Image (tube, rainbow, N blue to C red):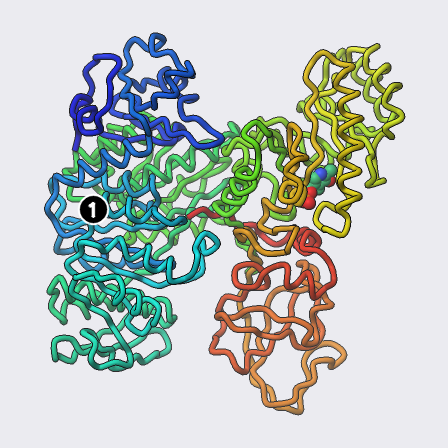
Amino acid sequence: MSYTIEEIADSINAGRIGSNDATIDWLLTDSRSLAFPEETLFFALSSKRNNGAKYIADLYTRGVRNFVVDKPTLKNKDIDTADYPLGNFLVVPDVLKALQKLADCHRSQFDIPVIGITGSNGKTVVKEWLHQLLSPDKNIVRSPRSYNSQIGVPLSVWQMNKDNELAIFEAGISEVGEMRLLQKIIRPTIGIFTSLGGAHQENFFSMQEKCMEKLTLFKDCEVIIYNADDELISNCVSKSLISAREIAWSKVDKERPLFINSITKEKDYTQITYTYLGMLNSFRIPFVDDASIENSLNCLGACLYLMMPSEKISARMAHLDPIAMRLEVKEGKNNCVIINDSYNSDLVSLDIALDFLYRRSQDKMLKRTLILSDILETGQSTTNLYRRVSQMVHSRGIEKIIGIGNDLASVASRFHIEKYFFADTTSFLKSDVCRDLKNEIILIKGARSFEFERISEELVAKVHETILDINLNALVDNLNFFRSKLNSKTKTICMVKASAYGAGSEQIAKTLQEHRADYLAVAVADEGSELRKAGITSSIIIMNPELTAFKTMFAYKLEPEIYNFHILESLIREAEREGVTNFPIHIKIDTGMHRLGFNPDELPLLIKRLKEQTAVIPRSIFSHLAGSDSAEFDDYTRSQIAVFEKASTEFQEAFSHRVLRHISNSAGILRFPEAQFDMVRLGIGLYGVNPVDNSILQNVSTLKTTILQIRNLAASETVGYSRNGKLTRDSRIAALPIGYADGLNRKLGNGNFYCLINGQKAPYVGNICMDVCMVDVTDIDCREGDQVIIFGDGLPITTIANKLETISYEVLTAVSSRVKRIYFQD
Ligand SMILES: *Cc1c(COP(=O)(O)O)cnc(C)c1O
């Protein structure tokens, strides 16, 4: 649906500057995601650290003409509307509120059932499953992916159009007060409360407060669906005075509206019988885990309320598909990078995936390729649909398209790039086009019936079953968490040394660059040049520059740390020989760490030397704290800071240009806010560990493997080398394809520690071998092929580090390079 700019100005009560005609179809909040400039309205959202108005100039040159800005932005002259004669500016007191108001007005146009889903886990799965269950009969609009925030919800609601018969939206909150705002935008008529976990708990007074807050979503619902066996939810619902009908389900209380008589788990499905309105019925789902069962019961409640016949429910439940919520980046054969998006194939998710591809492809050496299937189930005309698709494909810089399916083939002429079309997946897999894929970054996106998993299997390099899973959203959350502790002008250096603390520097650096880290720092020049080759353009500091690598540093503009006269002289000599001038360097002084650095009393000589040459120029001066994580050393830390304050001031006074000052690492940021100076150096915190109390912020890295083999052994047997694994009972022993050569410390063997299998602790039995280890799974319901967590989600890295009497830094960086890194974002 589109609106004229006048209509929008009216509905958000905006003042207007510029009187150009415009029709708006798309709302944009992140300038990097632009696809359709002419029909886009950009909301210049500002946060403490960033002002969206900064991007207006760039967007204008890319063709965007319509902007929502706030009054302070104009008052402070952050932009001058006179510079944009073709633009329309809608001026409001608060840009986020305006976005929400617009969604609210849009929502008012519709009088259809709207399902609102909240809870800590399972929101997206329930939403997608409901879509699978209901979409054969109804035209449904739903939140893309997990768009459930203060910004995501308005963008989701904006997708509603006249053809829709049902809407399904998620709502997620992180602070008290937010749900009320989301309720006003979604206005659900059917509410589903999935489950209540611990996420974001830090901002809540108590679980109860959190639960009550979430329930405000259901204020005006006709019905709410929830697990009555969850006491907290159940109590809060009674207290909340919501007058809605309830479809509360229970496995124990027959008086509840939906009674679950039995749940029977078989090998690969679960059979569920239930009583509703006095009728006994049953269905099965092709899953056996508890979370899936709970999600299916919430879906059941909604289907029953919508009066779906029980035969239909059971026919459709039996075919529920698993929900893959991740965009995965994997290494492919022939130097390809594979981006796998098995998420539902629809226009919005295609747009998100293309945007992701575009941002990941700064490396100009790789061709941007899209493998796309026909888009099913959209309810739009083919012409309209593929006109959109071709616009997206062209605007995201795709260079080659491989279309699979007859619809795509019929619109081949719309694509003005290298193109190939196939009737089905099999004929593509057999073709030369498939065989010849080389040096490309490939997005694979297909509707389920096209079985694109066969394509990714073919293209992805075979991996060892052991992988390190890297959550890029968590990394960004951690970055933002630390940024929230900084003054608005303080810059951030993100440490990506040691292969980004084991997470893999290239993809991590790309993500950090995208989120505008001011600097990146690595240990040696080669790490820096690898990043440059991968398309990283941020400033990069080399912490331990080698005397032999200056040429590399000049060639790739890698800025060395300089810690003594010897290295300074060598660098100046080399720079003069190469004709390099004003090369940026970073001066390190020793204030008490006693590792590397100039002594403060050497500064006068250093200043003199720097002033008599032009080959290099100091861009920053810094020092490193020896014990910022511990109160025990606070006096020492304060004296380091004082020495640094004095020395760096003396240094700055000698130069007319600004020299940035920095001393804090992750722990310093948290414990010494007064020592932020101009920059901070953020390391371990980015990767999810709070160095002060060893808690986990958002977990980034999870080391995972799978069960290779399970055997039953009698109590008299032993397991592994030197017969060290002595059994004391008849046991089930599982072998896992991970050993000390992968970074699994041998000291963890012989019952000293455990891994997690299906959420339960499986102790290591006997000695850990080079490539394999064995664990006791006697008490665990598991089978060959099941996933195993060595550390990460559910098993904090800090617990392993404590056991090994070391620090999480060592455990993270010990994961060997043969373990494949897989990156994902929700
Ligand atoms: C590694 C490193 C950091 C980052 O320290 P964290 O404790 O990981 O935050 C900061 N400064 C220097 C000089 C470093 O070598």
Question: Quick one: 75 or 496, which is closer to the camera?
Answer: 75
Q: Which element type, helix, strand or loop, lies under badge 1?
A: strand
CB of residue at label 1: within 8 Å of ligand 1? no
Residue 115 position by quadrant:
bottom left
Let me know if residue 498 appears in the view: no
Label 1 environment density (alpha carbons within 10 Å; few <14, some 14–19, many ≥20): many
Residue 273 in percent (x, y) is at 23, 79
Tell me the residue at 49%/37% (across/down).
438
Above or below for 50 versus 652: below
Task: Identify whether 216 is placed above or below 84.
Answer: below
Q: Residue 135 at x, y = what percent?
A: 18, 54
Could you say which quadrant of the image residue 422 lies in?
A: top left
Q: Residue at x 75, y 14 (%)?
A: 655
In the rendered image, residue 323, in percent from the top left (x then y), is placed at: 34, 57
Q: In this rendering, does residue 340 appear at all?
A: yes
Circle count: 1
**According to the image, label 1 marks what residue?**
141
Name the residue located 19 percent from the left edge and 68 percent from the top edge. Answer: 247
Q: In which quarter of the image is residue 38?
A: top left
54 lies left or right of 592: left
Residue 265, image x, y percentages = 34, 78
Ligand 1, seen in the image, is in the quarter at top right
- What residue sits 83% from the left and 32% below the top? 597
Task: Locate the N terminus by quadrant.
Answer: top left
- Residue type, numbered disc 1: Val
- Left-right relation of 732 to 817: left
In the image, residue 165 sits, relative to residue 407, either above or below, namely: below
Left or right of 579, for residue 98: left
Image side of residue 420 versus residue 597, left or right: left
